[in-house]
Amino acid sequence: MLPASLLAAESPVWNALTPQQQEQLSAGKPLLLEEEIADNAWPRFTVYHLVRSSPAQAAAVFWDCELDSKYVPNCLSVHMVSSPEPWIHDREYSLKMPMFLPDEVYVSRNELKVPAPGIYEISWNVLHARYIKESIGNIRIESHGDGSLIRYTNLVRPGSSIASLLRGQASDQVVESVKALVRQIEMEIQSSPQLLDQQLQKMTADLPISH
């Protein structure tokens, strides 16, 4: 269970959830919502999770994508391709695929934003990939009590004929990825404060000037 003080201050995203959904999150569990999309084999996945960190700490860990291969399930590697602006990074990802399929390799454009003080958003748009036609999404992190509320949303339009068979695995993957992110954030706070400080400095340097 999360400490009661974590539930004291409510965010706009939190207020949009039902009491049952809030209770699930307060118990330390992820919340997965699926929105069916017309003519698409996969729904839009949205995962919520509470984390014991500030929004800036959580965003800084997520922004450090090159670390993904250390903790994100099935992520083999991430490296920078280009950076049109400090707050826009084009990165190439390699992911292990199921069913003996060759690895997925794709390039994603990630953009860092601060839509309001204390709120961080990182959006992404896959520019080209081996298996998918399109992938767009974002993560929003805002203060909630003594910690933060994460909302991770992603919509993938798969290009493979076996996409319908992989729907369940896609659902599991997105939930496990968010859980892994939360574990990484809380681990760094407890055990790797120097790494976290470096990530915070890098993200702060990359932020749009208007922040």
Image (cartoon, grey):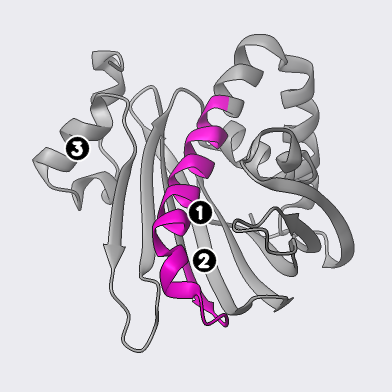
Residue range of the region highlighted in magenta in the rendering: 155-183
Please indicate whether residue 59 sits to the left or right of residue 156 in the image: right
The quadrant of the rendering that contains the N terminus is top left
Tag 1: residue type?
Ile
Residue 22 marker: 3
**Is 180 part of what is drawn in magenta?**
yes
**Label for residue 75?**
none
Whether residue 16 is situated above or below residue 126 in the rendered picture:
above
Q: CA distance from mark 2 to mark 1?
A: 7 Å
Measured from the top left, where is residue 16 in percent x and y?
20, 53
Q: Is residue 63 left or right of residue 121?
A: right
Say which amino acid is labelled 3. Gln
Where residue 59 sits: x, y (%)? 60, 42
Look at mark 1 in the image and give the residue it sits on.
139
Of the numbered discs 2 and 3, the one sitting upstream in the chain is 3
For the residues bearing labels 2 and 1, Cβ distance under 8 angstroms: yes
Dot 3: few (<14), some (14–19), or many (≥20) neighbours within 10 Å? some
